[in-house]
Amino acid sequence: MGLRGEAAILGFYELPPERKLAREKTFNLEQWARLSKAALDDAGLDATDINGIVTPLIGEASMFVPSTITEYLGIDANFAEIVDLGGAGSAAAVWRAAAAVELGLCDAVLVTFPGTHDVPTDDRRPFVMDDSMYFGASSNRYGSPQAEFEIPFANLGQNGPYAQVAKRYGHEFGYDELAMAKIAVDQRTNACATPDAIFYGKPITAQDVLDSPMVADPLHMLEIVMPCQGGAAVVIGNKKMAAKSKNRPVWIKGFGERVPYKTPTYARDLMYSPMVHAADQAFSMAGITRDDVDMVSIYDCYSITVLMSLEDAGFAEKGKGMQFVNEHDLTFRGDFPMNTAGGQLSFGQAGVAGGMHHVIDGVRQVMGRAGEAQVTDCNRAFVTGNGGIMSEQTALILEGE
Amino acid sequence: MSTTYTPPVLTAPLPVPTPLTRPFWDGLAERKVRIQYSPSLGEYIFYPRPLAPRTLADDLEWREISGAGTLYTYTITTRPVAPHFAAAGPMILAVVQWDEGPKFSTELLNVAHEDVQIGMRVKPVFCDYPEAGVTMLRYEPEV
């Protein structure tokens, strides 16, 4: 069961994140086009090579999203897919594209995630703060379980629920706030070697993390991503395209995905995330062990997400993740290189493109293009995606030739 | 001439029962906690559905439970989770596990922040909103 590893990421593009947009405002569709062109240029492929797309939700269409995009780009797609898995969406889109390539449906697929939400407005089409802006990932529509049983009880957004996960973790396994701070500190070290990172040149200490404002107990501000404007794209192709590309192909050797719930209140066991299944499937499909990977890029919307993903992906024993973090150097120079471009905590989270940050983090390393942050002799990367509140999770194994 | 923009004061949205979920909310108005039970699963379930989760068995029935439970997890929100809750100040957002099994998103009342403990026994507080025709279920420590 699974991929044969015959589809590769051949090019990528990631916009440097910005807190407030200094670039020209453009619509998601325009971003789709420009991000895609930049990734194609990076790969050395032509737009006419493309016969598939995978996209997240975009601002300008609520239905018929894939065909809206193919029309806009002028692509006759054999495979046009939309993924709605939040932060797990990018890694999920990558394996879907790889599957389409391996099935022979497509020679090359664009996986493009616009991440700039500050778009043009007009007096005749003003920006409207609707429910989706207020309630984020929770639906306030009549008939939605979230509208009825969660939003009225202030169970919405991300900070509260992730803090509840962290509280429960502390109750079951103990809580070392310095280890949690170290996750943010090591990633900041990596950002300081990554010029595009939003926190480039701004190192922090564990004390800085603990001194930052408490947002939702036990999570401090520096353990939480800061929303940014940005965007990212990758191009995935078959062996023929790989031969044409100017980059070292990064083959997609394995993936796993698990989507068991929306809201953590209803998780059967909140302490074991869907990553348990996703990572096991990915490693099994790729036929390698945890020791075989040279770097990991772990979805990091919060410090607790990283901690539990490390455990549930099998790198640390359940309940010993904090010890693992204390015993390892998680920087690009360290014995366990993780989130080597700074992760979303320190590179910046550009909406759903934040998930693509981890894919590109792995690709950049395996292609040998990470500059000062390059991990020596990096050939295999393990990448995760996480959407909702630890409720949608995807794992990828990427390998250079 | 300049104009000043006054942002709307947002209040917490209240639940709007559906035909299927109505027995739960009617129960709260009567100071009772009624949730669904699947005899074939041998489990209580929450939130209300037409068919049992996992098996999709068509045998769900409404049963009254005590409403007592334990605190499964919580957080104290120093910053509001949405503008609608800004006026509420720091809230204790809680997940309570009923003695019958299912978990429930709620808010913990009438307790000092430093006294909140995961695993503590909690009991229902029924909060009526007559203008909206709904009763909310919150929790406080069992004394």
Image: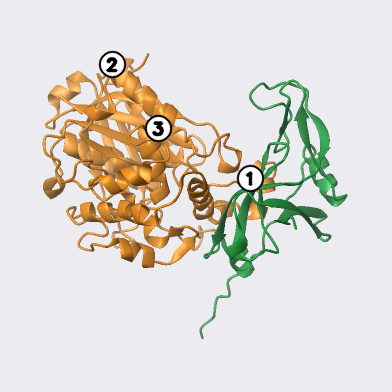
In the rendered view of the protein, which quadrant contains the N terminus of chain A? top left
Q: Which residue is drawn at 24% across and 41% down?
A: A361
- Chain letter for the part of the structure drawn in green: B
3 and 2 marks on the same chain: yes
Q: Is mark 2 on a helix, strand or loop?
A: loop
> x, y (%) of residue B35?
77, 38
Q: In this view, does A323 lie above or below A159?
A: above
Closer to the chain start, of discs 3 and 1, is 1
- Chain letter for the part of the structure drawn in orange: A
In the rendered view of the protein, which quadrant contains the C terminus of chain A? top left
Can I make out residue A233 in this image? Answer: yes
Q: Residue at x 20, y 57 (%)?
A: A192
- Residue nearest the observer in this picture, A138 or A50: A138
| Residue at numbered disc 1 | A146
Q: Label 2: chain?
A: A
Residue A4 is marked as 2
Q: Do the residues labelled 1 and 2 touch (CB within 8 Å)?
A: no
Cα–Cα span, label 3 and label 1: 23 Å
Q: In this view, does A258 lie above or below A355?
A: above
- Residue nearest the observer in this picture, A364 or B8: A364
Q: Label 1: chain?
A: A
Closer to the chain start, of discs 3 and 2, is 2
**What's the amino acid at mark 1?**
Gln
- Within-10-Å neighbours for mark 1: few <14, some 14–19, many 20+: many
| Residue at numbered disc 3 | A394
Cα–Cα span, label 1 and label 2: 40 Å
